[in-house]
């Protein structure tokens, strides 16, 4: 097959990591097919970190999401025909509609199916409305739809009434040799200077509003002063405005300036080092389709506390502690328990390491390739 992959929708966080690892493992396991990757200046270097004669890069300069949508609907169908592509995979939610080729669409962001927030600006609501309309049409047109968790499939099924034949649940993976509690790693300079030898509480994800970081800050502020001094809070992730300004103001209001560090986004190859120095990982999200950081933390031998949303209940299960994301007091109590109870920490570490072994990027790649093959064969009938 000649397989096209539209990666233009991936900008930060889990979407980038997913494509980076999926493509790398496809390059290892698939020696038959040829790939054509649509990438942009904002994501090419993050997504493509290997060289292969079977992977062809198509650089696209898109200025904004509206420009991207126009390109996807007009230019990509033309290029698919010109390149004699057999099938297209869209690891986002919006597919080119004006092509007869079989398409496979992945649901990576549940927000696209959720009600529009009235607190958003007119521009944001217009953008989301257009993306949602395109996504709905894309889901109907697609030969297959890939979901990254059972919970995201069930949510989408209630809204879209998806034919079960079209749906495939394929989990994200983890590289156990990269995220390992025994792998020797260099401590990042910013941690060496600011944290020293102290074990810290870690949040690692994009600093976006649905990540609910303010609940973590409020819970952390409720811990004893001595406990906070021994275990500072390190927040690693891209700073999204205006939410980051809100968090900065809250840190000042809670008098946490000496105990909270924002690092901004870090290169993917440095990410394992941040887990290794942590005594506890917390992800208090209101919404996730999968939640790769909780898996990375468990594989790194770090106890996990996460919100009790469906995706985390599915992925973390009993390998971590879950809490109501609207209740900072519950989170504070569970953080205190993990930080002060060595037996509990050891138990969570053991369960987390065992749970992480259930996930593999190679399995993700093989199952994705299987879906591509099935959709291609159906398209020939």
Image: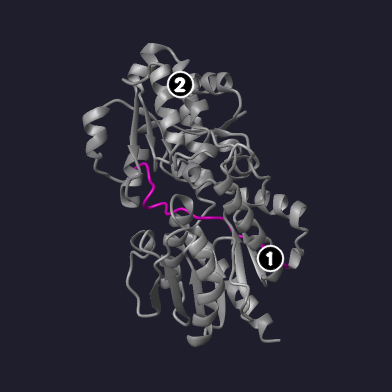
Determine if the magenta segment contains residue 174.
yes
Work out whether 197 lies above or below 59: above
Front residue (pair 244, 332): 244
- Is residue 12 something one can see in this rendering? yes
In the rendered image of this protein, does residue 77 appear above or below residue 207?
A: below
Compared across the picture, whether 104 is left or right of 48 comes to right
Q: Is residue 186 above or below residue 150?
A: above
| 330 relative to 102, above or below | above
At 27% from the left edge and 44% from the top edge, which residue is drawn?
Answer: 185
Residue 202, percent across and down?
40, 33
How many circles with numbers are drawn on the protein?
2
Q: Earlier in the sequence, mark 2 or mark 1?
A: 1
x then y, percent, for residue 224: 42, 12
Mark sitting on residue 137: 1
| Applied colour scheme | one colour
Q: Which mark is residue 30?
A: none
Nearest to the eye among marks 2 and 1: give it. 1
The magenta segment is 166-182
Is 357 in the magenta? no
The residue beneath circle 2 is 220
- Residue 302 in view, yes or no: no
């Amino acid at each position: 097959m000649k397989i096209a992959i539209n990666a233009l929708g991936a900008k930060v966080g889990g979407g980038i990591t997913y494509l980076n690892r999926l493509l790398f493992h496809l390059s290892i396991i698939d020696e038959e097919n040829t790939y054509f990757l649509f990438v942009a200046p904002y994501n090419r270097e993050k997504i493509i970190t290997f060289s292969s004669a079977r992977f062809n890069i198509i650089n696209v300069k898109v200025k904004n999401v509206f420009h991207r949508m126009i390109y996807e609907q007009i230019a990509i169908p033309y290029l698919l025909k010109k390149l004699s592509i057999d099938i297209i995979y869209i690891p986002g939610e919006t597919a080119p509609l004006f092509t007869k080729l079989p398409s496979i669409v992945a649901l990576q962001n549940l927000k696209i199916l959720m009600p529009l927030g009235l607190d958003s600006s007119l521009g944001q609501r217009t953008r989301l409305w257009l993306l949602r309309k395109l996504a709905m049409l894309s889901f109907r047109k697609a030969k297959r739809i890939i979901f990254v968790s059972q919970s995201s499939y069930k949510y989408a099924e209630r809204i879209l009434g998806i034919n079960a034949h079209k749906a495939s649940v394929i989990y994200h993976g983890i590289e156990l040799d990269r995220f390992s509690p025994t792998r020797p790693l260099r401590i990042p300079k910013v941690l060496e200077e600011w944290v020293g030898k102290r074990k810290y509480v870690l949040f690692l994800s994009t600093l976006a509003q649905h990540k609910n970081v303010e609940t973590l800050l409020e819970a952390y502020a409720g811990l004893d002063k001595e406990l906070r001094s021994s275990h500072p809070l390190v927040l690693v992730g891209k700073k999204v405005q205006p939410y980051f300004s809100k968090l900065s103001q809250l840190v000042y209001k809670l008098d946490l300036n000496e105990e909270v560090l924002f690092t901004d986004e870090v290169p993917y190859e440095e990410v394992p080092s941040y887990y290794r120095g942590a005594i506890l990982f917390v992800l208090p999200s209101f919404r996730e389709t999968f939640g790769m950081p909780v898996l990375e933390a468990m594989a790194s031998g770090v106890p996990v506390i996460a919100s009790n949303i469906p995706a985390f209940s599915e992925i973390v299960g009993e390998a971590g502690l879950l809490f109501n994301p609207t209740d900072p007091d519950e989170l504070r109590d569970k953080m205190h328990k993990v930080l002060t109870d060595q037996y509990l920490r050891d138990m969570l570490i053991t369960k987390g390491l065992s749970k992480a072994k259930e996930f593999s990027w190679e399995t993700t790649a093989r199952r994705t390739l299987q879906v591509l093959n099935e959709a291609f064969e159906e398209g020939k009938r």
